[in-house]
Image (cartoon, helix red, strand yellow):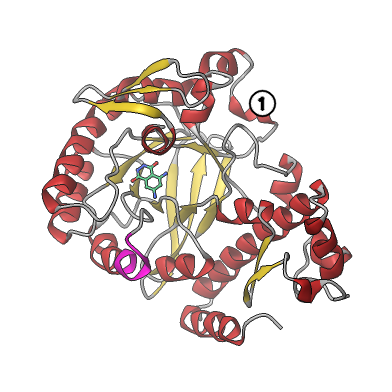
Amino acid sequence: MTDTFKFELLGTDGKARRGRVHTAHGAINTPAFMPVGTAATVKAMMPESVAETGAEILLGNTYHLMLRPGAERIEKLGGLHKFMNWDKPILTDSGGFQVMSLAQLRKITEDGVRFRSHIDGAYYDLTPESSTEIQRQLDADITMCFDECPALPAPKERVNEAMQLSMRWARRSREAFTHRPGYGQFGIVQGGTEKDLREESVEKLTEIGFEGYAIGGLAVGEGQELMFSTLDFTTPVMPTDKPRYLMGVGKPDDLVGAVARGVDMFDCVLPSRSGRTAEAWTRRGSVNLRNARHKDDPRPLDENCTCPCCKNYSRAYLYHLTKTKEILGLMLLTWHNLHYYQELMAGMRTAIEEETFDKFVVDFHALREQGDI
Ligand SMILES: Nc1cc(N)c2c(=O)[nH][nH]c(=O)c2c1
């Protein structure tokens, strides 16, 4: 526990950074991966199991929680940490991104977004002020600004409009933020894949001043090459003394490439969602447990993995659980995938500390090129 929100830059290796974020509910070693706890749960996992994978922070979705069970109800019940029995840090997104991807009938105005709930069709308004208040009611250690993320590809004029609106909303989000010891708010850099727009967005956000800065507007269909090229000109102009969080990313090779470009924090549904769709992520790439080649295979998913799935169960068993749609199959594969992601982040943290990150990257890709065996 700490009484001041701060980021320590502990070391670098090239552009890769090793750091630590201190929050009201504890510290987060970076580079860090945040499992997604959408509706106050990481699906198919007990919170104790999520902690056992090595996760030090979770992401909560404001859109889902405001609709059900409601931020007021969670506040009255003691906040999201108590509600979901997770006593480590929580970052909540602003809800704006999910409104655009999940809600019915949404209308963006200067004030905010009006939308109909995908659950019961009721109308809601979400603004920078109400999003920031909801995240306070949830007691998020890290609150995200309310922003607009345009789908790519988009004309530069549209990307610029969305970025300028997001910067105005960022100032309103900051004015609505309740400053408390150990709690922080992150601005979100927008600007698509346009260098000048990204630089302007960073300049406007740093002028407002936040405890951290996210890179939004990526992982929205642009592809890895464009994502990396955008990071190449965005991270160098971001503050070095504040955490950098790449939103919605990604596959293991996305994470390695983004850490190499100076990113500190990530969130993605991929490892947990894949666990429910019979896809396992290993050091050798992804493995589809629906494939009959596993039917009689007595080996674990990964003989070098120390997770409960790999220590105690065979591929044949995982194939059986997948084919029979047994809940245990979802649990074991989700646990393995989250464990693997945390092992990957821990490996990168150590490599940066030891200044062997370049070798880490070479070894990472070499194993994946061999593929599953
Ligand atoms: N890929 C992305 C995932 C996200 N959750 C977000 C977001 O919450 N806000 N803004 C964004 O640009 C964004 C991008």
In this picture, which residue range is highlighted in magenta? Answer: 222-228
250 with respect to 325 (left or right): left
Residue drawn 38% across and 25% down? 132
Residue 205 sits in which quadrant? top left
Residue drawn 56% across and 86% down? 366
Residue drawn 72% across and 44% down? 44
33 or 14, which lies in front?
A: 33
- Residue 239's x, y, as percent? 28, 54
Dominant SS in magenta:
helix
- Residue 21's x, y, as percent? 48, 48
- Residue 115's x, y, as percent? 36, 23
Residue 22 covered by magenta stretch:
no
In the picture of the structure, the residue carrying the numbered disc 1 is 82
Q: Amino acid at mark 1?
A: Lys
Q: Is residue 30 visible?
A: no
Residue 286 sits in which quadrant? bottom right
Q: Split into 4 quadrants, where in the image is the N terminus?
A: top right
76 with respect to 198 (left or right): right
Residue 196 sits in which quadrant? bottom left
Q: Is residue 188 visible?
A: yes
